[in-house]
Amino acid sequence: MRLKSLQGTWLGHDVSFDFDSSTRTWYGLAGASLKTHPGSYPLALNAESISGKTLSFERKIHVGHAKYPSIAINVPKRYTEPDPAQVEKIKQDQALKESLFPKSGPEREWSGRFLPPVDAPISDQFGTERKLNGVIQSTHQGLDYRVPAGTPIAALNRGTVLLARPLFFEGNCVVVDHGQGLLSLYLHLSEITVKEGDQVTGGKQIGLSGATGRATGAHLHVAVRWQGVYLSTLFALRLP
Ligand SMILES: [Zn+2]
């Protein structure tokens, strides 16, 4: 049966599907957070056929167990014991992110492959459990590339610049909205070379790497967030 539209629900998220006419396949993007327990979860699908018939079906998708490394790192004390003014700035940053991030609309802006932001070795993977200065436990929600300060950093895919400004922990930060709740985040930049509202394509420079914010040294932290859930950046880069 030929379908006119296909929509899904997965772990409480809406999943949009697009039809690729060359492979005659419907494609959708969805992920599970690091806090999801291993097990089988239903992907509920609702479709409408060309003739106007509605169909519903369900498929169980298995979320497997994964193990992540633990490391200890040291950062300047203000990042683990902020003073009252810094606590206020952290709160403002949080409110800004909470107001901007849900603005990603239902339209898909990304297309084709996700490109690496820089050609450099990876220095820390997604999911690492970190103990900061021996006091704060934090999960690494992105991918780190070892790059010297001043290296050009490129957008992973097409989108609109949602945020481009300095934040307390993130340092100079750029967030690109790829639509359908999919964001890519670029942290610790020495310089931002785009403005909020700019359109970018995959491979377009968004800034220069640096060590601003809570960083142990110059590197690029790049994260992928889907409807409020951080996903493995490498997973996005490996999508066909
Ligand atoms: Zn990082």
Image (spheres, rainbow, N blue to C red):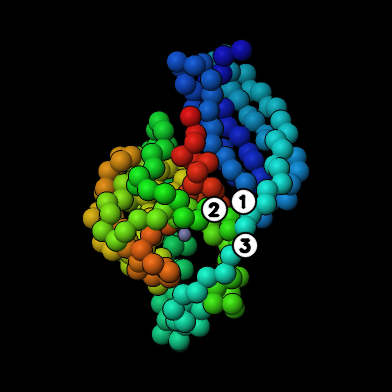
Q: CA distance from mark 1 to mark 3?
A: 18 Å
Is the residue marked 3 within 8 Å of ligand 1, measured from its CB?
A: no
Tag 3 residue: 70
Question: Toward which corner of the image does residue 137 lie, by quadrant?
Answer: bottom right
Q: CA distance from mark 3 to mark 2?
A: 11 Å
Residue located farthest toward the right when viewing the structure as drawn:
39
Q: Residue at x 72, y 38 (%)?
A: 62
Q: Mark 1 packing: few (<14 Cα in 10 Å), some, or many (20+)?
A: some
Q: Residue at x 49, y 40 (%)?
A: 236
Instruction: Give the percent coordinates (x, y) of residue 201.
Output: 30, 40
Question: Toward which corner of the image does residue 50 lie, by quadrant?
Answer: top right
Tag 1 residue: 33
Left or right of 149, for residue 120:
right
Whichever of labels 2 and 1 marks the residue nearer the N terminus, that label is: 1
Name the residue type under label 3. Ser
Tag 2 residue: 126
Name the residue type under label 1. Ser
Q: Residue at x 35, y 66 (%)?
A: 211
Name the residue type under label 2. Phe
